[in-house]
Image: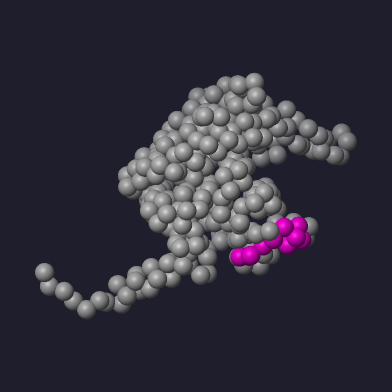
Amino acid sequence: MSRHAPNQTALAKAEILTEALPYIQRYAGQTFVVKYGGHAMGDPEAARNFAEDIVLLKAVGINPVVVHGGGPQIGRMLKQLGIESTFVGGLRVTDKETAYVAEMVLSGAINKEIVSWIMQAGGQAVGLSGKDAGLVTARKIEGREPDPNRGIERNVDIGFVGEPIAVNPKILETLTHNGVIPVVAPIAPDANGETFNINADTMAGAIATHVGAARLFLLTDVAGVLDKDGNLLTDLDPARIAQLQADGTVSGGMIPKLETCITAVEGGVDAAVILDGRVPHVTLLEIFTRGGAGTLVHK
């Protein structure tokens, strides 16, 4: 076999590996919780890239736990079944029938598709939800909407929508210690066994806190937190986030994401990161390069 002097592309790849080395050494043996959703879930190439990232993390000694969403997929299935959806404060009103469809889509189709992508990338994965092995216990939450008669917000019953109140990470620890990547659907029962749909960001944050994760990653459809000129803010803490919210820089759907990040870091997670899931291999760019790739929130 003939051999040639390495070209610049090969040398650049070697330099990337050496740049990643100290981060691999730092995080070996630690747990990363990755919330997967948005654009990447609907695009086969993006899904393949994500799966490769997760398998690579496992290969270098990091323990990834994937928590996924699926709001658009639930919406499409409800439409196919002729079930109308309404929203209160960004939360889908979820009756018994809608909760059944949500569990079918999240714990069934989406969860097993992600497991399949990870397996195809060379990893070992198991799909589960908050129901399995008592992983998560939920409680019902209420929505909030403006009261047209009083000019203030009022509580609204939005059905089977919940939030985690307890996490038992034993099943996750058992899987990760045996070389398996857990893939978690955001479905969980309450103390009476009723099934609740949970926001995937919230589910990921609660799991990250209870497994003592070094990092929580929220993959979304924007670059991260942007200032008023559209520039990426790469480093935030709770005090700075409060300022950004007060002056209107942060609004809409970014607020609950940042609240999840703050809760996680105040609960012991070293840092939480909001990343653009549309960027190929964005998780690796954030972890293994000096510049990072998104908005990092720390305590």
> Quadrant location of the C terminus?
bottom right
Q: Residue furthest right?
A: 150
**Within the magenta stretch, is there residue 241?**
yes
In reply to whether residue 82 is colored magenta, the answer given is no
Examine the rendering and report whether any part of residue 65 can be seen: yes
- Residue at horizontal 44%, vertical 44%? 177
Tell me the residue at 50%/62% (across/down). 26
57 w.r.t. 109: above or below: below
Image quadrant where residue 179 sits: top left
Q: Residue furthest left?
A: 1
Residue 120 position, x and y percent, is 32, 44
Above or below: residue 129 compared with residue 265 = above
| Residue 135 percent location from the top left of the image | 55, 33
In the image, is residue 51 above or below residue 133?
below
User: Colour mode?
Assistant: one colour
How many badges with numbers are in the image? 0
Q: Position of residue 62 (x, y in %)?
A: 45, 53
Q: Nearer the viewer, residue 83 or 122?
A: 122
Q: Residue at left 50%, top 53%?
A: 30
> In front: 149, or 121?
121
50 relative position to 146: left or right: left
| Along the viewing direction, whichever of 212 and 145 lies nearer the viewer | 212
- Residue drawn at point x = 87 percent, y = 33 percent: 149
Left or right, 36 with respect to 264, comes to: left
Residue 183 in sight in this render:
no
For the magenta stretch, what is the residue range? 233-243
Q: Quadrant of the N terminus?
A: bottom left
**Where's residue 143, x and y in %?**
72, 34
